[in-house]
Each structure stands twice: as C-alpha cells, then as structure tokens.
Amino acid sequence: MREVAIVAAAMTPFGELWEMSLRQLFAEAALDVIKKAGVDHLDSIYVGNMSGGCFVGQEHLGPLMADQIGMAGVPSTRVESACASGGIALRTAFFEVASGASDLVLASGVEKMNDGADVTNVLATAADQELEVYHGITFPGLYAMIARAHMEAHGTTEEDLSWVSVKNHRHGALNPKAQFPREFTLEQVMNSTLVAEPLRLLHCSPVSDGAAAVLLCPLDQAKKYTDQPIKILGTGQATSAMALADRKDPAFLDSVQLSAERAFAMAGVGPGDINVAEVHDCFAISEICCIEALGLVERSQAAGAAASGLTALGGRIPVNTSGGLKAKGHPVGATGIAQIIEIFEQLRGESGARQVQGASLGLAQNMGGSGASSVVHILERM
Amino acid sequence: MPSPRYWREVPSRLRLEAARCSGCGKVNYPPRLICPGCRGKESEPVTLSKTAKIITSTVIHIAPDDFLFEAPYAIAVVETPEKARFMAQVVDCDPSSVGPGMDVSLEFRLIRKEARSGILCYGFKAVPTASWEAKS
Ligand SMILES: CC(C)(COP(=O)(O)OP(=O)(O)OC[C@H]1O[C@@H](n2cnc3c(N)ncnc32)[C@H](O)[C@@H]1OP(=O)(O)O)[C@@H](O)C(=O)NCCC(=O)NCCS
Ligand SMILES: [Zn+2]
C-alpha cells in the first residue's frame, strides 16, 4: 500500500442554512478544497451522506455532486453508514489512493437536515426499524438508554453528562464555523428541557446543515499541493449488533473499541500517544463512552473527564476542540469529514484560539446508529 | 408501513415466537437463519414468556410524528426469563417510575396507528407487575 496524505480541507459553516440546498452545500466545500490545492482534475469522488432520500427526496448523489462541480465523467460514489458516512467515505478514499488506483481523490460529506422533513423520524432510520423504531424509540432515546445503563453500572451522574456539554460549548465558542458558538453554564444545561430522560436539549447535538471535504493524494506527491501535508497513519472500522438489545453490555460501545484497536495497530501507536482527538459526541453520554472505549482515558476517569478538565483545552488529552457535534453542529453525513478537518488544522497549527500546542498525532472517531458502526482515523504531522 | 411487511412480522411480533440455538442455547428473537452467538444453523422454536425484567429505559419527551400525542412515554429494553432481550413501551404507570431492575408483564396492545397506510399496528407492551409495585 502507498502512504496517503491529506493536502487540503474546507467546510461550510454548520447551522440552519435556509438559503443553501444540499447540492450548493457540497459544491461550496468541494470547490473550496479544489481551489486551495490548485488542482484542475480529480480521479475520483466519495460523498458521505446519510439520507438525502428522506431529508430532501434526493438519492444518487454521486453523479449529482460530480456534475455540480463541473466534474461529470469522474467516478463518484455516495457512501452511507448513517452518522458515520463521512468517516467511512474518507476510509474508502484512503484505500483508493493507497491501492495505487487513483492519485487525487476527494473525500466529502454533506447533509441537509433543515428542509421540512420529520427529522426525528428520518434519523431513526439508522436504528432497527422492525425491533426498535416500531415501538416509538428515537435517536436521543437510544442514547438515553445507554446513559441510564452507564449510570446504573458505573455511577455516572447527570452532572457528568452536563459537564461534557459545558466543555464542548466552551470549545465551540472559539470556532467561527460552529452552529452554537456560545457558552452555557452547568445550570443552563441541567435545566434545559427534557428530550429523552436523562438527556436534555443541551445534552444533544442539534439538527444541522453543512458540508465538508478533504483532498487525498499519495504522500510522495503531496508537496506539489501543500507545504504541510498531513499523513493518514491508520484507519480502522468495525460494526456491532444493530439493535441495542442485542449488545452484551448496553453501556459499552464495543464497535468503538474494535475500530480503535484496528487503527492503532495499523498506525503502530497507542492511545497514550494521541495529543488531540475528535470523538462522536452526538449526545453527552457518547463522549463518555467513546473516550473510554478508545482508551484515551482510564475507564474510571471517563465520566468525570470533562469536569476535571482532563479532556478540555489545556488538559492532558483535549477532546472535541472544534466544539464537537454538540456545539459545532451535526449535519450527519458531513460530520466525519469535519472531524478530520479539525485534526488536520490542529496538526498544521492553524486552530487559532483552539490550538493544542505542539500537537503531532491526532485521532478522529465517527460512529453510526446507536454505535452499530464506528470508524477511527489517526493522523500525523509530517 | 406496507401491509406485506406487517404481515411478515406477525409470528415474532404478535405471537412472541423465538428460536433456541441447538449449538449454544442462545434464544434469538426474532429467529434468524444463523445464530449470532455461535453461527450455528440448527434451532428449535420457543415461545417467549410474558414476563420480563427491565435492563435499561428512558422516557421519550420529543417523539416522532406517529407518537406525538403519546409523549411523554416510557420505553425499555426488557429481558424475558429465556434471556431474550427486546424493546417495548412501558405503560399503565407513571413513566418516571420506570427504571432498570423493574419486573414487568408483557401484554398484547395497540402500538401505533401508522400514519401513511392507516394500519393499526399491534404488539406487546410492558406493564409493571403488582408485586414490583408492592416492593417499591
Ligand atoms: C434535541 C432536539 C430534539 C431539539 O429539537 P427541537 O425541540 O425541535 O428544538 P428547537 O429547534 O425547537 O429549538 C429550541 C431552541 O433551542 C435551540 N437549540 C436546538 N437544539 C439545540 C442544541 N442541540 N443545542 C443548543 N441549542 C439548541 C434552538 O436554536 C432554539 O433556540 P431559540 O428558541 O433561541 O431559537 C433536536 O435538536 C434533535 O433531535 N437532536 C438530536 C439530533 C440527532 O439525533 N442526531 C443524530 C445523532 S446520532
Ligand atoms: Zn448459537
């Protein structure tokens, strides 16, 4: 396999972008990347997208998006893995470059959630329709059950959950692309309206529109496009039982652990070597479960990691410096690529007030459903 | 939901038909072609008991359109004595009283009126047992 680098990155702001359509969001991010890298062609395109069909009635996004950026003719493939669509689009693009089949591959993600659809219903298509959704479960509901199981097994508290939101909004307040770039107090989080007990509004990622894109090429060609390429050192993907009821321990995300083990093995590094991480905090409990399953913190420290400052900017392992899905926003198909962009910028020293000084190794973890898929990437400064 | 799908799911959903794996003894609900525990292909039919224990639960406040008028409602992962786990609403009680460890019985109920097709969708809901209520 060839070594692969990311040479350029761009994203739209995340938020309720009523003036922008699905295709416009994609085109804005993609054209920006193409301009930054100064390339005049692409060999292949991957578009991560959860549900263009249900959100806006549009499928077949591969050719649509290639056409929108003047690249009709180029192979273009839509990748779907619920909220992990973006991360898995990147992984697919990585293998196309690593294999030697293509040199210049665009990995992107896009979602248009604010367009009149019953969002709660559409998101629930990523759960098990026959066994879960039939009975009236929602996505916040699934993670609420994970939260309750975690509280029961490990004594995690509502305050622990709330600190994750407080921390991520502090980070997000420093990110101009974030949907909610503002701070919330612990009291505001703990008194926000209930969505699915014990999860409240301010424990949930919002409903967002947005797109993100990065350009991949072989590492030995990267200097043609940028002075500061970032190497993709490892990638790992895993699945778990689709229905929460079919997991051995509903409080543990085994797909996250498995995908991390694979990525670490490929990269030849361990969780202790990571300087900065973006993890899939679709709900406050997810961040706690993810940092624990990734091995970024000890299991006994996971619940209190946000409160103690361990995972805050300036802490031992800053997590979700972008504001995470919570504050930055979560246009589901775009999220996996946006996480990669935060790590890409951190490793290039471009994160401004959010900069983790001297970061040389970063990790991004993106997950789908209630944890039925997970994908982990490890990036390295050259 | 299209009616062929509803009809197809009748045996497991309306009759609680499951399968016990001949290889590892795991009860799979609904039955599958291959056991996720041991990949064995042999199994014998088993009907689940109508009692269960709550493993984890939540109370839904923001509901999908079909359940809009029922919120807030409790929903849980329950486990029957056969060790089959599945999701069910927990009703006939204060939703905020529902939590892990609770004993429930499973009762045949209307689950939803499907908006698009108008099909009345039935299945099982969980009801806290009298003995549980006495205990707490
Ligand atoms: C939590 C949720 C149900 C709230 O939706 P809602 O009840 O329709 O909320 P509204 O859009 O009416 O927003 C109410 C207010 O809270 C704000 N708000 C909404 N979601 C917010 C969030 N997650 N964080 C912070 N503020 C939020 C809105 O801007 C609005 O503020 P305003 O009154 O000042 O305008 C919705 O955001 C949601 O479903 N989130 C989960 C998304 C999800 O499951 N993603 C997939 C995960 S795998
Ligand atoms: Zn078996």
Image (tube, coloured by chain):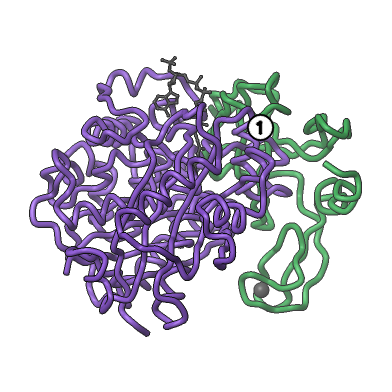
Chain colours: A purple, B green
Question: A122 above or below A33?
Answer: above
> Label 1 lies in what chain?
B
Number of marks present in the image shown: 1
Name the residue at 67% across, 45% down. A58
Tell me if the residue at label 1 has its CB under 8 Å from ligand 1: no
Residue A194 placement (x, y as % from top left): 48, 22
Residue at figure coordinates x 75%, y 66% from the top left:
B32
**Residue A148, x across and y down, in percent:** 45, 39
Q: Is residue B22 left or right of residue A321?
A: right
Quick check: B23 left or right of A97?
right
| Residue type indicated by callout 1 | Val
**Which quadrant of the rendered structure holds the C terminus of chain A?**
bottom left
B43 and A3: which is toward the camera: A3
Q: Quadrant of the N terminus of chain A?
A: bottom left
Q: Position of residue B69 (x, y in %)?
A: 70, 19
Q: Secondary structure at mark 1?
A: strand
Reading the image, the residue beneath label 1 is B90
Image vertical order of residue B72 relative to residue A12, above or below: above
Q: Is residue B101 visible?
A: no
**Residue at the (59%, 58%) spot, across then down:** A62
